[in-house]
Amino acid sequence: MSAAIEIKNLTKHFGAKTAVNDVTFNVEEGHCYGLIGPNGAGKTTTFSMMCGFLFPSAGSIKVLGVSPTEPGALKGKVGVLPQDAILPPTWPVGDLLTYYGELSGLPNAEAEAKQALERVQLPETWNVQAGALSHGMHKRVSMAQALMGSPPVIFLDEPTAGLDPKIAASVRNVIRELKGKHTVVVSSHNLQELEELCDATAILDKGKLVSASTMAELTGQMAEFRVQIARGEVPLAEIKALSGVKDARMEPNQVLCVSFDGQAVTPEEIITRAVGLLAQKNVLFLTVWRGKRLEERVLALT
């Protein structure tokens, strides 16, 4: 699989402040890639340089083999949802999206606009003025603009921020549908959401890259799993004796952590054996998950 986005030694200065400091990572074609970091980490600046909104002070970016700094290089190739996208309030949604499509050079901008509104489940807003949209509708109309023309690369900055749970779930479904067909970069503070959606991720802190890996590698999904114990005495010695288990231990808050040899046994096999043993010993548990939660890993790294 080839890289759709290549970032090498990327640096951005704002006067004496270094917002992004020598960052290098690649985004594979067809992947959903997460940009993670606390406020001030440099992820919005990195996102903006990937989109061509800002130019690097040093280093390079290639999106589909071209630099975002070249005039018109990304036209028709990239769709962008900025975090604080603002729509002209007096424009009807349909006219606005059609106009955006025409600016992008789409051959049938009106049809593309209608299709994009269908994808975000807002066809009824066609004749509604943008200023009359609710926050959730505004966000989804802005996302529709990013999807028009089915660009191969799509950048989404905080796509579900401020949305109610039902609307946020529908936006996540749209992102799932994009995976594999498009390369999607998502910048978000919602770590649970990124863990659910992303194939890989870059974690930034104070302008520097602290981790760039697949989600499975980051959370250790291929090497360990955890069980939230509700009640009962966990038979640690017997779990350690299971074939393929390397170690078993109790962590805080009654969490059983089991690490295993991924070459000797598949995750589904060892999880089934361990959970079955707990059931035999009348140990009650609430949930099972592989690896560490993304939130735990991010907190440990930043």
Image (tube, rainbow, N blue to C red):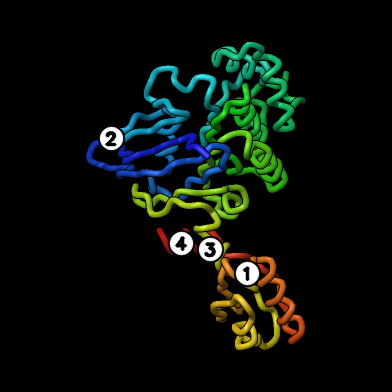
Q: Which residue is mark 2?
A: 58
Q: CA distance from mark 3 to mark 2?
A: 33 Å
Residue 130 falls in image quadrant? top right
Q: Quadrant of residue 162?
A: top right
Mark 4 and 1 residues: CB-CB less than 8 Å, in contact? no
Q: Amino acid at mark 4?
A: Leu
How far across and down, in percent of the image, does residue 154 sit? 55, 32
Q: Could you tell which of marks 4 and 2 lies nearer the N-terminus?
A: 2
Query: From where the camera sits, is residue 255 visible?
Result: no
What whole-number distance in Å separates the C-alpha atoms at marks 4 and 3? 15 Å
Closer to viewer: mark 2 or mark 1: 1
- Residue sitting at x 74%, y 87%: 281
Q: Name the residue tied to disc 4.
A: 299
Position above or below: 117 against 279: above
Mark in the foreground, 4 or 1: 1
Based on the displayed image, in which of its 4 quarters is residue 169 positioned?
top right
Residue position for label 1 = 265
Secondary structure at numbered mark 1: loop
Which of the two marks, 3 or 2, is nearer to us in this view? 3
| Secondary element at tag 2 | strand
- Where's the C terminus, which quadrant? bottom left
Q: Give the residue number, with chain letter if any, for mark 3.
A: 220
